[in-house]
Amino acid sequence: MSSVDAWMTYYQARAATLPGAGTPWLDALRKQAIDRFCAVGWPTSRQDGWRHTSLALLQQQEFNDAVADANTQSVQEQLADLRRGEAGHWLVFINGGFVESLSDIGALPQGAVVMPVSQALDAHSDQVQALTGTEEDGPAPATLNTALAGDGGFVSVARGVDLSEPVHLVFFTVGNGNAVFPRNLISVEQGARATVVEHYLCADAGTDADAAAILTNAVTRTQVARDASLTHMKLQVENEQAYHLAFIDAKQDEASVFNSHSMSFGARLARNDISTQFGGKHCETLFNGLFYVNARRHADHNTLIDHAHPDGVSREYYRGILADAGRGVFGGRIRVAPGADGTDAVQRCDSLLLSRMARSDARPELEIYADDVQCAHGATVGQIDEDALFYLRTRGLDDTHAHNLLTYAFAAEVIERISLPGLRDRVTGLIRERLPGGAVLGDI
Amino acid sequence: MTMLEIKDLHASVEDKKILKGLNLTVNAGEVHAIMGPNGSGKSTLSQVLAGREAFEVTGGSVTYMGHDLLELPIEERARAGLFMAFQYPIEIPGVSNAYFLRAAVNAVRRHRGLDELDAMDFLKRAKEEMKAVGMKEEFLYRSVNEGFSGGEKKRNEILQMSLLEPTLAVLDETDSGLDIDALRVVADGVNRLRSPDRALIVITHYQRLLDYIVPDHVHVLSDGRIVRSGGRELALELEERGYGWVKQLEAEQAPQTGAAV
């Protein structure tokens, strides 16, 4: 049985119990999506954008339903840790299901809606349908998500409303052997503002070689209306049994702002497809990314910024730290459509290799069909700067401290662009705990 | 008390011989100036003392406070009280000056068996010293040397020196690229540090700095060896006669290859 057939079987066994089952448009969409996925299959390394990330091993894995009661102590501790010092509205999902008892949605301004998609299917069905899109959106894994989409966050902010506190969507995978398909829908209407943070975490999972794999296949669809502003952050911290495939897709109207921050600490395989399309003049976007991959982890970011209209501004800065036998991949495409004059785009990807076994592949792609544009791009791969190391040591810092400090410093530029202080500290902490002897850095 | 004793030091970089039998003795409380033309080995000497790995010591010895300095790792030299002010201080984007300075101070304090300074105590002390070298507080929160002007970088070196309270400080062309005001600040910083327990080695191309930091001994370095030593007046003589004179001195010494000066 091919891996595609297994997913058809998986779908057939669960279609009747998925969120929104019995809703005609959604049932039809899921059916179309699974048919399309089975026809197209998983991306292969011959496909554009998948050359350095192979899903062959993923296809050999089998996935089952998750254990029923997964609200474990470890989940509660991690959540408490996450919430410490960080305000906002919290929606918690364990193994794909919304957990009301762990969630905490505070007072919302009039016109703002924050709830799980499973509830929005009834309460805001038209909007859910409009945001969900079609089975043809995104790469094949996103199509599989459409077929099997579970719960996720629904955030809708009405015209002119400022949802000042961030919405945190926390996804825990508990145990081994299960697959989850989060689907998040975000709409920020004219002149409105919002910040949404997605956290992906694991708990109580075996991580030895025999432990069964975990799959998270997530899709986030976003609409940012005219003059609106959305900051989207994603923090992915999963274990070495995890496969993580995510598709984040924004549609921007005139003069809107979409800021994307993606912080990935890898997994057995983590792949993020992030794209935005400018739907009018004067759109702005920031793609800020950091990946830190150690052990035998793999992290891939594949991004697309589509300057479909004039006078758009995009800034894309990715940094990767590759330790041990870790592998990082960055593919960044910037497309400037015919007539999109006045486009101003900058793209950079810099990688720091900490080991001889580590590897980084960066592939910037600029497709420019307009004349009056400013586009700059660059990619570097380097090692710790010997001069800086020497300088720090002449001031009494030992070799470990100096190395760790310079590694952190490399990431700092990306971290500093994160506007939420709690999240900045968290990313710093995650780096510190991964660096050998990183505790020496202390409060930085 | 002899603080530093360099005997017949030979050093190479990328197989090119730079130091060719350098001898120098520095006692506590003394200020030594080492002058010489470009390429004479001034910077190599400071790099070797600080422990730069690219410079290979091929002969001779360096004894610091009774220890074999060349055996000590870079950071242990620093912790043992050796400080080098860089000719070209390194920029470290992403590390705040405050973090860097405190980490350095505490690394040295730990070695000396003192309690580490907490953030509050450190800031208090750093601000005092910054005032003395004419640095604004904002420099604490900027990345180390990043975007600093030449003068600001040198002030930052002097700030580090003041905070680390070294036993032996080596200033590698700290005067290069400084205007007269910055030069005074640097010199004041150095002079404040002068004490009977400390020694200073001022490496410079120009006599100018020595108007402000008056040395006890002046040495002329040429082709990897000290070709003449004297008092303050030697610097003035060198200024007057120019480095062409050094070539003559070197020629006069040529037959004594390898011998102590």
Image (tube, grey):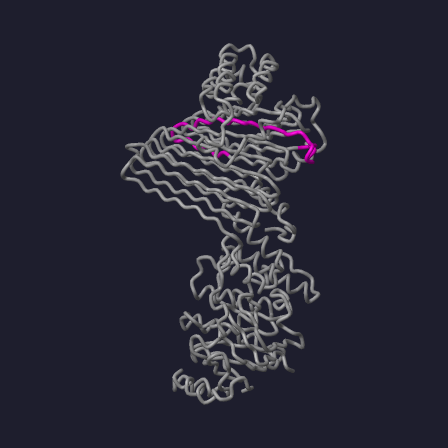
Picture quadrant where residue A77 is located: top right
Residue reaching furthest to the right: A73
Q: In this view, does A104 lie to the left or right of A250?
A: right
Residue A133, position in %: x, y? 45, 20
- Over which residues does the magenta segment extend? A203-232
In the image, residue A220 lies in the stretch drawn in magenta: yes
Q: Residue B179 versus residue A392: which sits nearer the camera?
A: A392
B116 and A36: which is toward the camera: A36
Let me know if residue A165 appears in the view.
Answer: no
- In this view, the residue in front, B165 or A97, is A97
Q: Check the image and report above or below for A434 versus B129.
A: above
Q: Nearer the viewer, residue B122 or A179?
A: A179
Q: How many marks?
A: 0
Quadrant where the N terminus of chain B sits is: bottom right
| Quadrant holding the C terminus of chain B | bottom right
In the image, is residue B4 above or below residue A172? below
* Percent x, y of residue B176: 43, 71
Locate residue A416, reporting x and y percent: 51, 46
Above or below A24: residue A384: below
Q: Position of residue B12 (x, y in %)?
A: 52, 72
Residue A376 seen in render: yes
Spot the residue most to the front: A1
Q: In which quarter of the image is residue A237?
A: top right
Q: Does the magenta stretch include residue A158?
A: no
